[in-house]
Image (tube, rainbow, N blue to C red):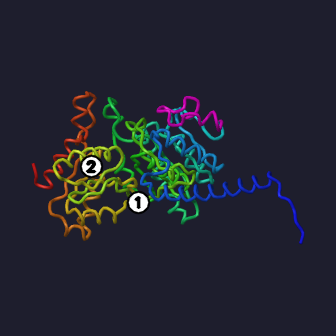
Amino acid sequence: MSSFLVSPVTVKMATLCKTIRSATATASKLSQFSRLLSTTPRCNVQMAVRDALNSAMDEEIERDEKVFLLGEEVAQYDGAYKVTKGLWKKWGDKRVLDTPITEMGFAGIAVGAAMAGLRPICEFMTFNFSMQAIDQVINSAAKTFYMSAGQVPVPIVFRGPNGAAAGVAAQHSQCFASWYSQCPGLIVASPYSSEDCRGLLKSAVRNDNPVVFLENELIYGTSFEVSEEALSKDFLVPFGKAKIERTGSHVTLVAHSKAVGLCLEAANELIGQGVECEVINLRSLRPLDDQTIIESVMKTNHLVTVEGGWHHCGIGAEVVALIMESQAFNYLDAPVLRVTGADVPMPYAKSLEDLALPQVKNVLTAVKKSLNIS
C-alpha cells in the first residue's frame, strides 16, 4: 500500500476553492431572488424630447448609409431648436446638409433622393412652412408609389414642430394633424413622450412610405422617463398602435402630442372626486388605432377628445365618427365631447393666446359635463 504526503499549501488551496464555489452559488441564488422581488424597472432614465429625437436620428444615420438629414440650419447651427445638435460635426456635409430658405426646393430635392433609393429626413423649421412645399409632400411623395403601380417607393420623413408655440401669432401656430391625416399614401405620427419620439422616429426612417412626423416645440425641453428597452438601437414603436397612458373606468380621454399632458393633469385632479380617467395617447394619426379607442369606450361609456388644433374637421371629429360607426356607439351613456383650440387664427397677445388654446380647466369641464357631475 503506497502512501503520500499532502502539503499544507495544497490543503489551503482546496479549502479556498470550496469556499469560492459556495459563495458563488449563494450569490447566484440571491441575485435571482432579488430580481423576483423587484417591482420597478431595472434601468429607467430621464431623457428630454429633443435628446430622444437627436439620438434616434444619430443611430439611424449610423445604421444605414442611405439615411441623411437636410433642412434649414440643421447642420452648422445645430438646428433652430438644437434637435440636431452635434450631428453635422459627427457625420459631416454628406449626411447632414444645410439648405437655403426654400421649402419647395429642398423638399423637392429630398423627395427626388427618396425616389432614387436614399432615405432622407427632411426638417421643416416649423410645419407652418411646409405649406410652401405641400405640393411636394402631397402630389409627389404621397402619391408616387400608387401612381407608379408600386414600382417607385418614396421612403422619406418630413419632421419638425407642429401646432402652437408661444407668442408667434397666426402664421406660425397652426396644427396640421388633420390636414395631412386626410391624405392617402402618408403615414402621420404625433408623438408625446421621449419614448414615443425615439420609437416612432426610428420606425419612420425605416419605413418605405412617406411619413409626416409632427413634433411640438413646447415640449422639446421636457424630460420623460425612458425604459431600458427604449434605449436600444433597435427600439421601434409601430404605427397604428396607441398607448394607454393611464387606465380608468369612468371616462376615456383621447389626445395626441402636447394635449396628452393636459389629459394626464386633468385625470390627476379628478381622482379627488372619485373619477378615474383612461387616457389614450394616439401617437399615430394615420393609421389610427381604432380598436384601442373602441374597447376603451365600451368599458368607460364616456368619451372626451382633446387636441390643440381647430374644432372643424379635426382629429377629434374623426374619433367621434369612428365611435358613431362602431359597436361602441351602443355603449355610450352621454354624447361625445370635444376639447379643441378656438376656431380663430391664433392671436398674438398672451392673454388671448391662452384663451385660444385648450387648458386643463377645459378638459375638467368637459369630463364633468359628460359624467353629469359638478
Kind of residue at disc 2 = Val
75 magenta-colored: yes
Percent of width and height locating residue 373: 10, 52
Q: CA distance from mark 2 to mark 1?
A: 18 Å
The outermost residue toward the top is 349
- Main SS, magenta residues: loop
Residue depicted at 30% across the width and 61% down the height: 293
Q: Which residue is mark 2?
A: 306
Q: Which stretch did the figure color magenta?
A: 74-92
Percent of width and height locating residue 252: 25, 57
Kind of residue at disc 1 = Lys
Element assignment for label 2: strand
Q: Which residue is mark 1?
A: 241
Residue depicted at 23% across the width and 42% down the height: 360
**Which numbered dot is residue 143?**
none
Answer with left or right where residue 212 lies relative to residue 342: right
340 up-or-down from 7: above or below: above
Picture quadrant of residue 216: top left
